[in-house]
Amino acid sequence: MASNDTAELTEDMVRAALAAVRTPEGVALSVSPALSGVVVTSGKVYLSVNVDPAQARAWEGVRGAAEAAVKALPGVTSALVALTAERKAAPASAAPAAHGHGHGAPAPSRAISVPGVAAIIAVASGKGGVGKSTTSINLALGLRDLGLKVGLLDADIYGPSVPRLSGVAQKPETTADGKTMIPLENFGLQLMSIGFLVEEDTPMIWRGPMVMSAISQMLKDVKWGPLDVLVVDMPPGTGDAQLTMAQQVNLAGAVIVSTPQDLALIDARRGVAMFERVNIPILGVVENMSHFICPHCGGRSDIFGHGGAHAEADKLGVPFLGEIPLHMRIREMSDAGLPILVCDPDSPQAAAYRHVAQGVKAALERVQASARKAPRIVIE
Ligand code: ADP
């Protein structure tokens, strides 16, 4: 903890502390070429250490020691050391942390709530690439259009996309006391992403416990709010990291994004099951890339068949929130940092997202009303 808020913590102080930490080769981390990034924002320290992914296990001890050494410095309120890899990371669905058993203590079951945030909702998918992040930002904007105060937390630490989708990239500032980061803002949304803190295109190697510590810092050490809803863009898949997140964060509910293909639906079922296992209400399922809208003639083609996700949602007894078409403009503009609700708010595509947002708001109101009536009992 900070002993004194006026003591200015500098990068040199952090590097000096790292002199006592040895790499697996016995070199001081402070002078090791592996130390690729040091970010000091008031009391918060983020380090990235570039390692060969094959050596990640050997580096885990170094990572822990570096975190401990930095945390011991006066004025440090939190420290996060990320192992990063030079090479392109594996696809998100094969993210190593999902299989990172055996590292660190089991996650505590205490729920993380965020002061100033009335409801946290998770946007999840059974696998990567289904449009979870695109849905998250447009859902957040749709909720904004319904008059809610909304934040978007990019918890997809394997492939943070909020910087790209929101067109925002600078590092967040900290509050005057240095204790919390101030979320960035664009389109009337409060935004936070690990992508604001580390260099772009630096794939990170996440070990199980790190994932939760990074996400919980972005929940608790950020001056959110006051917000009606914080939309959390979850890491894709249903591995340990996602389960821990579902267990530890006081989520009001979850939205599952799926494409119409069967395989994705199987994955989506896994997503639903994961949240149900930890008693998080499913606010509903969104079918993304539901049908193709031709950018030239506006004609519709049901390339993957039609109605699969809706039928599946009915079978699972969860609300169906709507269909988002596969449309060139959604991809082009969102990759350019302009979500469709911002660049084409009057388009049918934007209306589809707003329809989903209405369904989410209604489902949220239902679960909040029933939570007031009966406190949730979680049996582990
Ligand atoms: P995920 O978060 O599930 O990995 P993304 O939201 O990053 O997926 O989407 C993957 C790619 O698909 C992006 O290039 C995005 O622009 C595109 N995309 C997502 N939804 C749509 C859509 N409805 N129409 C067209 N392109 C889409």
Image: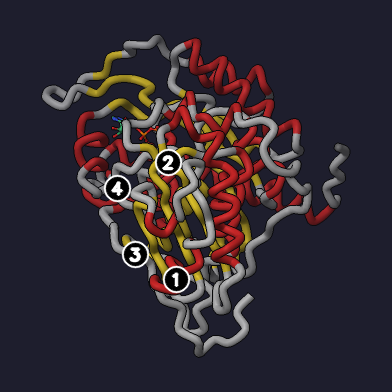
Which mark is drawn over residue 171? 3
Task: Please name the residue that numbered disc 1 is placed on.
Answer: 182
**Relative depth, front residue between 343 and 120:** 120
Question: Is the residue marked by circle 1 packed among few (<14), some (14-19), or many (20+) residues within 10 Å?
Answer: some
Tell which circle, 1 or 2, labels the residue nearer the N-terminal end: 1
* The N terminus sits in image quarter: bottom right
Q: Report how far apart the C-alphas of labels 4 and 3 lie in the structure.
A: 12 Å
Please give the name of the residue rendered at 13% of the width and 22% of the height, measured from the top-left corner.
297
Q: Is mark 1 within 8 Å of ligand 1?
A: no
Residue flagged by tag 3: what amino acid is it? Lys
Q: Report how far apart the C-alphas of labels 2 and 3 lie in the structure.
A: 18 Å
Task: Please name the residue that numbered disc 2 is placed on.
Answer: 204
Placement of 13 over or under 202, stated as above or below: below
Tell which circle, 2 or 3, labels the residue nearer the N-terminal end: 3
Tell which circle, 3 or 1, labels the residue nearer the N-terminal end: 3
Q: Is residue 226 left or right of residue 84?
A: right
Residue flagged by tag 4: what amino acid is it? Glu
Placement of 290 over or under 344, stated as above or below: above
Q: Nearer the viewer, mark 1 or mark 2?
A: 2
Q: Report how far apart the C-alphas of labels 3 and 1 lie in the structure.
A: 10 Å
**Relative depth, front residue between 178 and 9:** 9
Which mark is drawn over residue 308? none
Q: Nearer the viewer, mark 4 or mark 1?
A: 4
SS label for mark 1: loop
- Give residue 28's position: percent from left, percent from top: 46, 55
Colour scheme of the picture: secondary structure
- Give residue 360's position: percent from left, percent from top: 55, 44
